[in-house]
Amino acid sequence: MKNAIKSIVIAAALFFNITAKAQNAPKLENSLLWEVSGNGLSKPSYLYGTVHMICSGDYFLTEKTKKAFDASSKLVLEINFADPKETLEMQKLAMGKEPLSKKLSPEQLTKLDAILKRTSGMTVQQVDGFNMMTVMSLISMKSFGCTDLKFYELDFIEQAKKKNMTFGGLETVKSQFSILEGAYSNDEMIKMLEESDQEATSKLVEEYKKENIDALYDIITDKKVTSEKTKKEILDNRNLNWIKIMPELMEKETVFFAVGSAHLGGEFGVIDLLRKAGYSVKPVLN
């Protein structure tokens, strides 16, 4: 049960990282893996875009990614899930500060109940103690249509431990949850859930397996539910914060950064921001 809750909360912390599309995005080559070099670095580091969770049958890691991972000495994720303190914080944040039955209006509860019954066979009463992000992650997990979900971040951590790599995070669970909670209204969250379905998730996975960053942007963006304000809070501003942290980490050693693929592209995407900071960022194609 503890591991199940951990997976749900990780999904909650990561779900929103693939829901916003950067505007005026420069076209990127089809690659999830990018090499970062130059600007005084003695060794290259690597940037990898994840889809966070995926069915075991669709899970893959290319040889180029394995090679880059083996060449790295530090694994840095959005959140350092290898830190027990962060795991404990996740479990705390999974629960709402107040029951959903008090937080949501009767109309919102009715809509959420209908969504839960349609997607997971659950009722709103069964999730009353969780916060909205946790509920959204539960529904998102169901949209994959399988019971054997794998999490890229958890797999990377497992492999990193075997290699005795060190770990790091670009932000904390607490800060990420705070950002996400402030980025969406309850109506926007419910609208997102109404619009999501298994067909859209299947298309996302299909394009992810092609490493098609531009197509992923098209699929995971719904302008009807993602405002410009929300995009800036959950994507652009966080990218700008990460860019302040990444240089110092890369100066010391070869780092393997694994973040949501939506953070790679766009005018304020990590790739473009690193290039503007003077780094060479090239796709690893083979």
Image: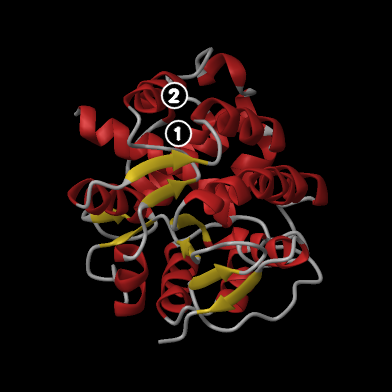
Q: Position of residue 121 (x, y in %)?
A: 32, 43
Q: Residue at x 45, y 61 (%)?
A: 50
Q: Amino acid at mark 2?
A: Phe
Q: Is residue 270 above or below residue 178?
A: below
Q: Residues within 10 Å of mark 2 (few under 14, many from 20)?
A: some
Judge left or right: residue 176 versus residue 75. Answer: right
Q: Disc 2 on helix, strand or loop?
A: loop
Dot 2 corresponds to which residue? 130
> Taking 273 as reference, is 178 above or below it?
above
For the residues bearing labels 2 and 1, Cβ distance under 8 angstroms: yes
Residue designated by label 1: 134
- Quarter of the image containing the C terminus? bottom left
For the point 22% across and 69% down, the residue is 57
Residue 268: % across, % down: 75, 59
Classify the position of the N terminus by image quarter: top left
In the image, 268 versus 116, the foreground residue is 268
Asked if one can make out residue 163 in the rendered structure from this viewpoint, the answer is yes
Marks 2 and 1, how far apart in space? 6 Å
Secondary element at image label 1:
helix
The type of residue carrying mark 1 is: Thr
Let me know if residue 113 appears in the view.
Answer: no
Identify the mark at residue 47; answer none if there is no mark: none
In the shown orientation, is residue 86 left or right of residue 276? left
User: Would you call the spot at circle 1 few (<14 residues within 10 Å), some (14-19), or many (20 or more)?
Assistant: many
94 relative position to 106: left or right: left
Kindly indicate the quadrant of the structure image that contains residue 82.
Answer: top left
